[in-house]
Image (cartoon, rainbow, N blue to C red):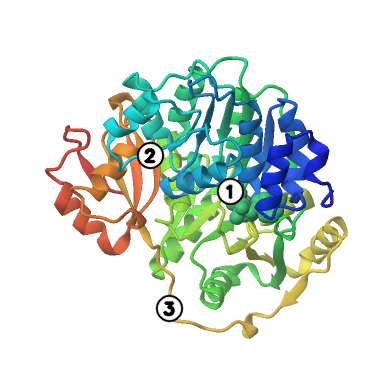
């Protein structure tokens, strides 16, 4: 796959020369797999990281269809951040060097709106922007999407993490039905499959085998008696001192007991199971996902739909009901090219279950002794706190509005603000612990979009 040449794609001679001058001698794996379909106008959903050459993959697709005689915007790329949008614009401009008439415009917040509107009016064949600012231009009728032929979602998983789902859906509704949609994402959580199903036509799925795709999970088991389990969990947490941990239990009562026990010992743990109401469930999951909660104690059912990119430790307080469930549980760690550890507690009489798991997974699981674990007094505390704002989608609040208020009157820098989750009537935003009180002081009388909203920490 790797050695396929750009010349096999039917690109123009000028483009081939340009690629040569850029030093692009061979296609990268993602380009080799996706470009033939992209150039045939097919929708694709591709799992690709930064550094894979994905920008050139969709950039060449965009440029192949642009007519520089038509001044209307014909390509639209949505990116999660201003930095990425700038990078993407730069790469597309490099690819478009052979046709100086093609104009690429970046539309992100933080730049004067009027100047951007003026640039659109002067003709911008390809728009690269963040969902919030692009939507502002659409709403204020400075950007029209009637002629968009290629629509790209870049780093779609990050955009969903940042709460841009509704903006994206609103924008898509205004695009011509005949457009081609190219979706790129570093990870492939359920939401990506759902959004792909919603907005794409028979997309070709593209993944590139890389060492990042093979999970790096160290699997261990620790034999304990039932009454020693809580202490074993403490020893494991002390030994690994992870920033985030999921502990799986068999029953709801056990989840509650373990979470209470850990809190008494100074850990920040929350339980989750099916007795929780929907809102409570959402709040617990989002606090864990946004790093306001370090330990989640969950039943299998309750942890469904939870997709955490950076989870260093999974503890099975009880062995799961089947080897398949074991694989599912431990697969929560070791994602996105990171390594992870999965430790299962088991009783002497359950040795046969461990053998069953080993046979199923075709691995040998290492047995560890509790005495071999290091003690450590430092307890990893959450790095974020969750601010709950009494306003949501129905109040027309968008992630950009919250970010704007926090970095404006709130006095924060963008890197002190974490994940933003917006529901109908509430929004939640993760704030770095060390500046949490500052925000509340600064914003107590402050406004979001000119209106006052009550806010409190969960
Ligand atoms: P990206 O994953 O799109 O951020 O691209 C990573 C880097 O690879 C960028 O600096 C590109 O200019 C470069 N690049 C993209 N395609 C190729 C190629 N076929 N050969 C060499 N470099 C490339």
Q: Nearer the viewer, mark 1 or mark 3?
A: 3
- For label 3, the residue is 378
Question: Which residue does the image show at 54% across and 68% down from the upper left?
Answer: 230
Q: Give coordinates of residue 169: x percent, y percent.
A: 49, 25
Disc 2 vs disc 1: Cβ atoms closer than 8 Å?
no
Question: Which residue does the image show at 55% across and 25% down from the upper left?
Answer: 68
User: SS of the residue at dot 1?
Assistant: loop
Name the image quarter holding residue 217: bottom right
- For label 2, the residue is 108
Q: As displayed, is residue 408 above or below residue 182?
A: below
Towards the viewer: 125 or 32: 125
Towards the viewer: 256 or 209: 209
Q: As displayed, is residue 102 above or below residue 187?
A: above
Disc 3 vs disc 2: Cβ atoms closer than 8 Å?
no
Q: Determine whether the beta carbon of the residue marked 3 sits less than 8 angstroms from the nearest atom of ligand 1.
A: no
- Residue 22 shows up from this direction: yes
Please state if 56 lies on the left or on the right of 253 as rendered.
Answer: right
Q: Give coordinates of residue 398: x percent, y percent.
A: 34, 33
Q: As displayed, is residue 299 above or below residue 138?
A: below
Q: Give coordinates of residue 173: x percent, y percent.
A: 50, 18
Cα–Cα span, label 3 and label 2: 42 Å
Name the image quarter holding residue 397: top left
Please state if 156 lies on the left or on the right of 28 as rendered.
Answer: left
User: SS of the residue at dot 2?
Assistant: loop
- For label 1, the residue is 299
Cα–Cα span, label 2 and label 1: 42 Å
Please state if 205 lies on the left or on the right of 50 as rendered.
Answer: right
Q: Nearer the viewer, mark 2 or mark 1?
A: 2
Q: Which mark is residue 178?
A: none
Circle 2 crowding by C-alpha within 10 Å: few under 14, some 14–19, many from 20: many
């Amino acid at each position: 796959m790797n050695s396929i040449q750009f010349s096999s794609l039917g690109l123009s001679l000028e483009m081939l020369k340009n690629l040569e001058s850029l030093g692009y001698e061979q296609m990268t794996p993602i380009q080799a797999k996706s470009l033939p379909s992209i150039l045939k106008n097919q929708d694709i959903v591709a799992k690709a990281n930064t550094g894979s050459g994905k920008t050139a993959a969709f950039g060449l697709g965009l440029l192949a269809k642009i007519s520089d005689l038509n001044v209307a915007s014909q390509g639209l790329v949505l990116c999660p951040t201003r930095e990425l949008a700038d990078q993407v614009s730069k790469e597309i401009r490099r690819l478009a060097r052979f046709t100086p008439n093609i104009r690429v415009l970046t539309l992100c917040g933080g730049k004067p709106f009027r100047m951007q509107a003026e640039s659109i009016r002067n003709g911008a064949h390809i728009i690269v922007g963040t969902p919030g600012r692009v939507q502002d231009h659409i709403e204020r009728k400075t950007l029209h999407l009637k002629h968009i032929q290629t629509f790209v979602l870049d780093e779609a998983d990050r955009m969903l993490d940042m709460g841009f789902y509704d903006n994206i859906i609103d924008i898509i509704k205004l695009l011509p039905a005949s457009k081609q949609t190219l979706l790129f994402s570093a990870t492939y959580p359920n939401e990506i499959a759902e959004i792909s199903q919603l907005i794409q036509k028979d997309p070709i799925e593209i993944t590139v085998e890389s060492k990042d795709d093979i999970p790096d999970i160290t699997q261990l088991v620790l034999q304990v008696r039932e009454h020693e389990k809580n202490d074993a969990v403490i020893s494991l947490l002390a030994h690994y001192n992870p920033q985030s941990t999921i502990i799986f239990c068999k029953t709801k009562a056990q989840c509650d007991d373990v979470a209470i026990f850990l809190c008494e010992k100074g850990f920040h743990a929350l339980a989750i199971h099916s007795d929780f109401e929907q809102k409570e469930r959402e709040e617990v999951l989002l606090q864990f996902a946004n790093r306001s909660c370090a330990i989640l104690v969950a039943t299998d059912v309750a942890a469904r739909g939870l997709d955490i990119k950076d989870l260093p430790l999974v503890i099975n307080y009880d062995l799961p009901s089947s080897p398949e469930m074991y694989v599912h549980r431990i697969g929560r760690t070791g994602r996105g090219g990171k390594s992870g550890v999965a430790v299962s507690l088991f009783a002497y009489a359950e040795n046969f279950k461990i053998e069953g798991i080993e046979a199923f997974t075709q691995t040998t699981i290492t047995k560890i002794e509790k005495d071999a674990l290091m003690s450590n007094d430092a307890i990893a505390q959450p790095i974020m706190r969750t601010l709950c704002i009494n306003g949501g989608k129905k109040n027309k609040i968008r992630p950009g509005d919250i970010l704007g208020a926090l970095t404006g009157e709130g006095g924060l820098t963008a890197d002190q603000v974490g994940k933003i989750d917006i529901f109908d009537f509430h929004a939640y935003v993760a704030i770095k612990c060390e500046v949490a009180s500052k925000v509340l002081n600064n914003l107590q009388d402050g406004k979001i979009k000119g209106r006052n909203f009550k806010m409190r920490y969960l």
